Amino acid sequence: MMTKLFEPYTIRNLTLKNRIAMAPMCMYSCMDEDGIAGDWHRVHYASRAVGQAGLIILEATAVQPQGRISPQDLGIWSDDHVEGLSQVTSLIRQHGAAAGIQLAHAGRKSEVDGPIQAPSAIAFSEDYKTPVEMSTEDIRETVEAFTAAARRAGSAGFDLLELHGAHGYLINEFLSPLVNHRNDKYGGSAENRYRFLREIIDGVRSVWQGPLFVRISAEDYADGGMTADQYVQMAEWMKEQGVDLIDVSSGAVVPAKIRPYPGYQVPFSETIRTGADIPTGAVGLITSGLQAEEILQNERADLILIGREMLRDAYWPYQAARELHTEIEPPVQYSRGWTF
Ligand code: FNR
């Protein structure tokens, strides 16, 4: 029996062989601090493709050097990054998965040396530096950096792009009224707080015709913060601009307490999927095939993103398939593992 989890899923020109995506996860493994993908990235991501995930989304990859969370982050701010990333996409695709990349800027959560930027000059917590409030010129340069990064991602052979609009990083900082205290056209109303992301999506769409996701933090878990209901309007704008799927995460915008439980972010995905009539991805403490299948069967999301469970088990899709009594094809080299 074919389950929904193992059904192919088409987004624009791309067909994934199943609905399992590896969630973007920073590896902090560019030891020369140059943002260039190396052996770790080739082995780590290719293993999950052999493990039969339909889509692998590479970790938050910085569009500007000051947009790195740490000096060991992957980068895509220069043409020098294309060669290393091309090797990763080539390996992922050789093993039957699609290759995605999360384009990111850490904003006020950057821990690199030197000044850091944010919509307003407010630190995340006392453990972080106070950022410099971005000028209109800084905003323009950053939008251009996302656009240039999207162009480079195309050259590196990626099938899909995701913009990191979640977890309290730069885009999220503009969207949330808890962090964005600006008085110009980039702050205040929802429309104004959305303007930075709007300009980035327009920039990216001018150079990239393939599938485009945006990851959001649908709930700030703090008074006066964003909620999934409020994100419905923004998701409608994203859809109008040609975003294909909202990857629905939550939190980390301000240091608020979260009490996660299995599937805790799925209700946010449902709210946005129903409210804005746009495909969504569900992520967060999804660890079993049955749990993933329930989410898809009940149309609570269109794609399942697996994070930590895929760090523990690169071959998680095989386990999920067994649980769902579905057969999936192993790579030919491993087929004897399936003979008894
Ligand atoms: C993450 N997460 C994350 N999210 C993101 O949007 N970009 C990123 O680069 C990272 N980096 C990252 C590193 C590591 C080591 C972990 C564990 C997590 C969050 C991740 O994508 C996912 O949303 C959460 O881990 C919740 O899903 P799971 O792990 O419960 O399946």
Image (tube, grey):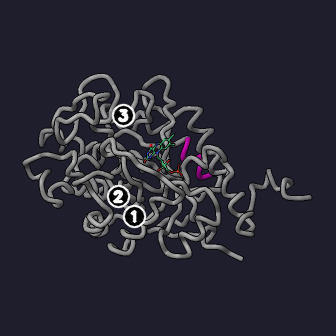
Which of the two residues, 189 or 15, is positioned nearer the viewer here?
Answer: 189
**Range of the magenta residues?**
88-94
**How dense is the environment of label 3, judged by Cα within 10 Å: few (below 14), some, or many (20 and up)?**
many
Determine the image quadrant of residue 229.
Answer: bottom left
- Indicate the position of residue 45 as horizontal and vertical percent values: 58, 44
Figure quadrant of the C terminus:
bottom right
Which amino acid does the dot numbered 1 rest on?
A: Phe
Relative horizontal placement of residue 183, taking residue 83 as reference (left or right) = left
**How dense is the environment of label 1, judged by Cα within 10 Å: few (below 14), some, or many (20 and up)?**
many
Residue 290 in sight in this render: yes
State the mark number for residue 268.
1
Figure label count: 3
Confirm or reject: label 2 Cβ below 8 Å from ligand 1.
no
Q: Verify whether residue 75 appears in magenta.
A: no
Residue 55 in sight in this render: no
Q: Main secondary structure of the magenta part?
A: helix
**How dense is the environment of label 2, judged by Cα within 10 Å: few (below 14), some, or many (20 and up)?**
many
Counting residues from the start of the chain, the first of labels 2 and 3 encountered is 3
Q: Secondary structure at mark 2?
A: loop
State the mark number for residue 68.
3
Distance, label 2 to label 1, CA atoms, is 6 Å
Which of the two residues, 6 or 273, is positioned nearer the viewer here?
Answer: 273
Relative horizontal placement of residue 204, taking residue 140 as reference (left or right) = right
Where is mark 2, residue-wise?
A: 218
Q: Verify whether residue 92 appears in magenta.
A: yes
Q: Residue furthest left?
A: 183
Q: Write the residue at 37% across / 57% down.
A: 214
Vertical position of residue 7 compared to residue 314: above or below: below
Tell me whether the residue at label 2 lies in contact with that at label 1, contact meaning CB atoms closer than 8 angstroms.
yes
Q: Secondary structure at mark 1?
A: helix
